[in-house]
Amino acid sequence: QFNGQPQGSAQSQAFDNFTQQVSAAGQQLQNDKNVASIITFYKGLVKKPAQAAADFVKNANMASGFIFIGLFAIVEVVLSVVYLLSSVIGGFGFSFYPASFFEGIFSGIVGEVVRVLILAAVILVVLNAVHKDKKVTFAQTLSAACLYDAVYLPIILVAAIIDIIPFQFFGNVSSWLHTFAGVVGYVSIFFGVRAIEEDDNKLPLVCGLAFLATAIGSTIVNAIF
């Protein structure tokens, strides 16, 4: 029944309302102090990475840490899709099994969350063991633990996308980016922990034990899932 309004105009109005809602949600996220701290971290990562890592830990907040973990989970899903596309493009006799695909996504997300939490917990225990004069909080160590994947995963995502291109050179570029991502991730953790532990002589032990425990925890998680 004609109601005096063209159908195209109604659809245009609905689309405008949707874009306004998305814009308002985005502005609300930017105004959130926890999201703002993450944005500030990435902005400072280009010019002053050490300072950006230290400031993020010094302004530690549990909420921003868990927001980061949520972002890590999203990146893991995207990575699974990119790896699937890479297999489709570059593989012969490719077979897709939905159950295995979604199981891999679930395992990746669980493993990511567990790795970050184990890393944060071990840093907390070790730092509180070596510190007698001040109390280290889980918010601080969670923020420090997030720094590795905050730097590592975006670079790995770029590497995975480049690896889709079916030429050997781009496969080498992807491998180089993996190496770069690992080094930058470890250095970010170093500066994050250094913001809590000012004695450089203790940092190798703290970081070493933390990543050892994380590797053991990841092995256990992968065996379970």
Image (cartoon, rainbow, N blue to C red):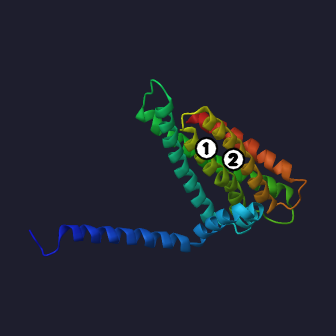
**Closest to the observer, 171 or 50:** 171
Q: Quarter holding the N terminus?
A: bottom left
**Gap between marks 2 and 1 measured at Cα:** 9 Å
| Residue drawn at point x = 10 percent, y = 71 percent | 2
- Label 2 secondary element: helix
**Closest to the observer, 126 or 187:** 187
- Label 1 secondary element: helix
- Left or right, 136 with respect to 28, comes to right
Residue type indicated by callout 2: Ala
**Closest to the observer, 13 or 200:** 13
- Number of numbered discs overlaid on the protein picture: 2
- Left or right, 65 with respect to 15, comes to right
Residue type indicated by callout 1: Ala
State the image coordinates of residue 12 (x, y, percent, origin top left). 28, 69
State the image coordinates of residue 80 (x, y, percent, origin top left). 51, 41
Q: Earlier in the sequence, mark 2 or mark 1?
A: 1
Residue 31 position (above or below residue 162):
below
- Left or right, 123 with respect to 8, comes to right
Q: Quadrant of residue 58?
A: bottom right
Answer yes or no: do the residues labelled 2 and 1 have beta carbons within 8 Å? yes
Q: Is residue 153 visible?
A: yes
Within 10 Å of disc 2 (Cα), the crowding (few <14, some 14-19, many 20+) is: many
Residue with the mark numbered 1? 159
State the image coordinates of residue 194 (x, y, percent, origin top left). 81, 59
Residue 85 position (above or below residue 17):
above
Residue with the mark numbered 2? 181
| Residue drawn at point x = 57 percent, y = 33 percent | 167
Within 10 Å of disc 1 (Cα), the crowding (few <14, some 14-19, many 20+) is: many
Q: Quadrant of residue 47?
A: bottom right
- Left or right, 91 with respect to 128, comes to left
| Residue drawn at point x = 68 percent, y = 60 percent | 143
Q: Quarter holding the C terminus?
A: top right
